Image (tube, helix red, strand yellow):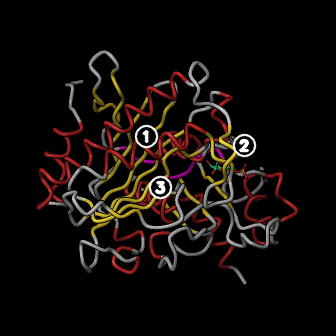
Amino acid sequence: MRQISVTEHLQLHQKNIPEATGRFTSLFNELILSAKIINRAVNKAGLVDVLGDTGETNIQGEHVQKLDEYANKILIHRLQRCGVLCAMSSEEQADLIQIPRNFPKGDYFLVFDPLDGSSNIEANVSIGTIFSIYRRKHGNLESVELHDVLQKGSEQVAAGYFLYGSSTVLIFTTGDGVHGFTLDPSVGEFLLSHPDIRVPEQGKLYSVNEAYWHYWDKKTQEAVAVFKDPNSDLGQLYSLRYIGSLVSDFHRNLLYGGIFMYPADFRDPKKPHGKLRLLCEAAPLAMLAEQAGGMATDGLNPILEIEPQELHQRTPLVIGSRKDVQKVQDIFAAE
Ligand code: P6P
């Protein structure tokens, strides 16, 4: 295959963001440089002092792993300087991250989860960086407010993730299909490896943490049980695959077909809408799923149509092959 870089591909495929030629590409280049730096640390985890727990907890009340913190700092440091952002939001930080006064700014708003799946770091399980890009709605560049940037997922200009696994891949969309690039360490570039990814209409895999069965409502139990019923009208047997690293579970289902579910459960009254975050996890993956011909809901409603009320809002997530996600939606919609 001819070696196509991300920059070349953006120039070929960015008709959806005509005014963004240089500006959008410079944002992507800083994301790519950040991912290369994070990847280097992930690949050395265990050899240098980036493993283990910092003893702190993040906005989500989760223990912060050192690699999480490192990835967060790299992304903020690099993206603050790209000159095209008005603000950022990180899964690791409670509030909007303003661009320092003396730095050049622009109209894009970046949301990211710096290192999703971090609880798996020490077990050498693949982990990832998820990103989502919006254009600010209005407001003053020098002091961005939440209402200037908070938008539903259908307003995303671009979305994607880096997956630090057996190889390091970048999967993204700018609204013109989903494309995958693999890092070639010999040249230090992400090169096109998965052009125009399409998720199979129906999968053979379902991903959900069944340990929470007794904390789900009846509809959720029915929706999960259908994938274990050899006589269901889905007409085939499924296998359960659950890595416990969202980007890994999503990536496998994107390529092979399948459905990932993180339903609401009743374990923690403070989290009635489940564990996953709308803005930095569900919405970017939902844009990718829909652009690849799949589907993403909260069980009943399209993820991309949910109007966020706060930065770290959580949502149930059902995402993947269209026929499988539709089956769950039919169960939730039935009286
Ligand atoms: P559970 C990792 O901590 C994460 O946020 C996602 O990457 C993953 O899908 C989920 O949590 C796993 O959560 O409750 O099944 O351990």
Give the labeled residue for mark 1.
162
**Left or right side of 20 for 42:** right
Residues in magenta? Answer: 197-205
* Spot occupied by residue 116 in the image (x, y as percentages of width and height): 56, 46
Residue 257 seen in the current view: no
Q: Which amino acid does label 2 sit on?
A: Leu
Q: Is residue 316 above or below residue 201?
A: below
* Residue matched to label 3: 285
Q: Distance between the Cα atoms at labels 1 and 2? A: 24 Å
In front: 83, or 246? 83
Q: Quadrant of the C terminus?
A: bottom right
**Quadrant showing the N terminus:** top left
How far from the left and from the top, in percent, is residue 103? 22, 57
- Which residue is pictured at 59% across the width and 38% down the height? 66
Measuring 53% from the left and 44% from the top, which residue is drawn there?
A: 69
Up/down of 154 relative to 102, above or below: below
Name the residue: 20% across, 53% down.
24
- Residue depicted at 48% across the width and 47% down the height: 114
Mark toward the start of the polypeptide (1 vs 2)? 1
Q: Earlier in the sequence, mark 2 or mark 3?
A: 2
Question: Distance from label 2 to label 3 (Cα)?
Answer: 20 Å
Q: Mark 2 points at which residue?
A: 240
